[in-house]
Image (cartoon, grey):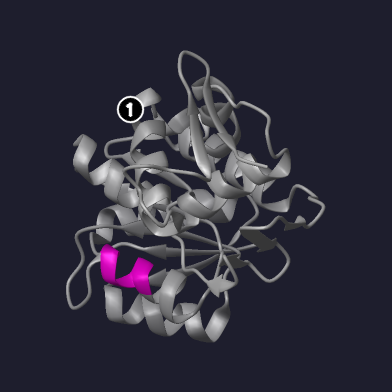
Amino acid sequence: MKVLVAEDDPTSRRLLYKYLQSQGYQVLIAENGAEAIEVFRREQPDLVLLDVMMPKVDGWGVLSEIRVEQGSDTPVIMVTVKDSTEDKVRGLSSGVDDYITKPFDLRELQARIEAVMRRYKAPQTPLQLKTEAVEIDDERKLVRIYGQPTELSPKEYELLKLLASKPGKVFSHQEILDTIWSESDFASSEDVKKYVYLLRKAIERDPERPKLIVTVRGFGYKLAG
């Protein structure tokens, strides 16, 4: 398994390189964001450990290259000294698979890598769903709303896919959290509400009067059949 370590601090970089090699990984190194993009394109690693604060191109720019320009779902664990809720929300909503804050225990990092890879490699049956309003092709990650192609963020897509897996079923906040967030994300009901709001903005004709993503007061949300 190839792991790309994008880290500008030489001490941290050496430590991660030695530790990950000792765990049997093939380790690729990038000292700045521009180099990380180049290595990612050339080597196509299985996982990326991505520092936020890097010269030339920061971690957000590298993440955008991976998710948007390359269209890759390669797992990304964001490694940073920042511990603010805003940074975590930004990272998770931009397609980060996990988030770890410096300083961290190397055993914790190893556990997070293993958890992310288990989720990534878990076999899933591609969802094919078509109702009068919503069409999802999970194999190609395509969404059409009322016949029109619709772009969603990774988290918005996962939320819609979950609701669409059983149209009419009411999903509680906890069910949604357990399915589309990992235990290490520290997500809450407020995150669920935020993404329901964003999803409605993306797919509803009138987000203030939603017809597709329906709130069942006191219970949760459902996709109207």
- The answer to whether one can see residue 83 in this image is no
Residue 134 location, x and y as percent? 62, 58
> Can residue 204 be seen in the rendering of this structure?
yes
Q: For mark 1, does the 10 Å Cα neighbourhood hold few (<14), some (14 to 19), or many (20 or more) residues?
A: few
In the image, is 164 to the left or to the right of 178? right
Q: From what the image shows, is residue 220 above or below residue 70?
A: above
Of 153 and 120, nearer the camera is: 153
| Residue lying at 28% horizontally and 74% vertically, measured from the top left | 33
| Tally of numbered discs | 1
Residue stretch in magenta: 59-64
Name the residue located 29 percent from the left edge and 81 percent from the top edge.
Answer: 34
- Identity of the residue drawn at 45% across and 18% down: 217
| Residue drawn at point x = 61 percent, y = 39 percent | 115
**Which one is in front, 193 or 88?**
193
Residue where numbered disc 1 is placed = 190
**Secondary structure, magenta segment, majority class:** helix
Viewer-proximal residue among 61 and 223: 223
Quarter of the N terminus within the rendering: bottom right
- Residue 105 placement, left or right of 167: left
Looking at the rendered structure, the kind of residue marked 1 is: Glu
On the image, the x and y values in percent for residue 132 come to 67, 58
Residue 197 among those drawn in magenta: no
Q: Secondary structure at mark 1?
A: helix
Image quadrant where residue 103 sits: top left
| Quadrant including the C terminus | top right
Q: Quadrant location of residue 81?
A: top left
Q: Is residue 4 left or right of residue 121?
A: left
Q: Is residue 172 above or below residue 87?
A: above
Residue 98 occupies which quadrant of the picture?
top left
